[in-house]
Image (cartoon, grey):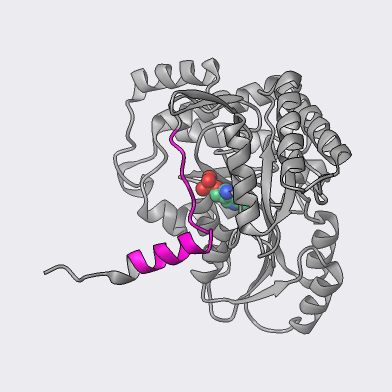
Amino acid sequence: MAVPMKFLSEELDAMKQAGLYGTIRTLESPQGAWVHIDGKKYLNLCSNNYLGLCNDPRLVAKVKEYADRYGVGPGAVRTIAGTMSPHIELEKKLAAFKGAEAAIVVQSGFCANLTVIPTLAGGADDLIFSDSLNHASIIDACRLSKAKVIRYEHSDMADLKKKLEENSDGKGKKLLITDGVFSMDGDVAKLPEIVELCEKHGVIVAVDDAHGEGVLGRGGRGIVDHFSLHGRVDVEIGTMSKAFGVMGGMAAGSAVLVDYLRQKARPNLFSSALTIPDVAANLASVEILQESETLVKKLWSNGDFLKKELGALGFDTAHSETPITPVIIGEASDAKAFSAKLFERGVFATAIVFPTVPRGTARIRAMVSAAHSEDDLRFAVEQFAAVGREMGVIS
Ligand code: PMP
């Protein structure tokens, strides 16, 4: 007889009572500036579709072309069933785009961290230096490693320096991992200082540029390009689920590093490759980014507009340096009520609460996209103003 897993309903009920149970909406339309939910239209302010590519006809056309030529599934893991030429084509394109020698494509950004972190620093003698606000996939990837994880205070270079100095001997490898853009606040890692400190202490530098890909740097080439640190950051980890508008993860670096990951990283050895439609759509995204900076520029001007307007109304938009626009509300229940009231007014903007952000800093994270028009954003600002006044968040 099946085990009565009472803890399931008990814990779910506790989450509901604490206001931490997430409502997951069903979209009846593609991701875009506006989406359809329960037959109604809502302004979409919560996707990572930074450049509006999720439903771009050029991506859809490439998917059809490649699906006709190569089918859909990869058959098995690449080391057993062989790698398909579209994956190699994408890896070459991504490496050229990033200005790296080589790149490996994996199934997701989450998998990209699992690909890099335990593979490069997995031994019990190894050390991993990790920013205290790093993404959950980095934390989980660190947990899969036998290395000792040393957390330094978020973007605190004095604390990092101290921890590097305290751990300057030891026989194992040392790796530093940081988010490039911290997704809940929109601030950018102090990569030049990090690189300098790590060079001094012989530490491998890996940056997860999930929210910098297609956003920072020339034409969206990412954080390494943004700071002109080519050749000084050992591994750039990325995802194609955000600005690229598709799905998939990558790691870019030297040819020998990528060769090592291909031979040793468990997501490459034990999980099948990305599907052909994903690969094809990603190829189209890179081509679009290589051709023009228009979408990246539009994204930034939209982000600047929204931050300026919400800030002028008196909202606390924290210290974002990117188009990510957090609107701090405070308590989880208030942020959820704020989100529900926005929804009633036609704005889909999910509340982000503990454990994704620290308690007391629950927020609406407004995600603009190049797909939004100025009218769309004006509509958003009007609704934020109305709800903000009604709830006493602004006066
Ligand atoms: N790293 C960071 C910093 C992220 O923000 C995310 C997505 N939230 C991921 C990795 C995971 O990416 P994916 O959705 O492609 O698995």
Residue 102 shows up from this direction: no
Position of residue 167 relative to residue 95, above or below, is below
Image vertical order of residue 8 relative to residue 191, above or below: below
**Residue 216, image quadrant:** top right
Quarter in which the N terminus is drawn: bottom left
Residue 20 painted magenta: yes
Query: In this view of the protein, which residue sits in the foreground, 375 or 16?
Result: 16
Task: Report the number of discs.
Answer: 0
Residue at 59% in and 54% down: 257
Name the residue furthest left: 1
Q: Quadrant of residue 39?
A: top left
Q: Is residue 106 magenta?
A: no
- Residue 33 lies, in percent from the top left, at 61, 25
Tell me if I can see residue 26 in this picture: yes
Residue located farthest toward the front when viewing the structure as drawn: 390
Figure check: 170 above or below 103: below
* Span highlighted in magenta in the image: 9-26
Residue at 65 percent across and 28 percent down: it is 51
| Residue 173 percent location from the top left of the image | 63, 73
Residue occupying image coordinates x 60% and y 61%: 354
Residue 340, relative to residue 257: is it above or below? Answer: above
Residue 258 in the image: x percent, y percent? 56, 50
**For residue 293, what is the image quadrant?**
top right
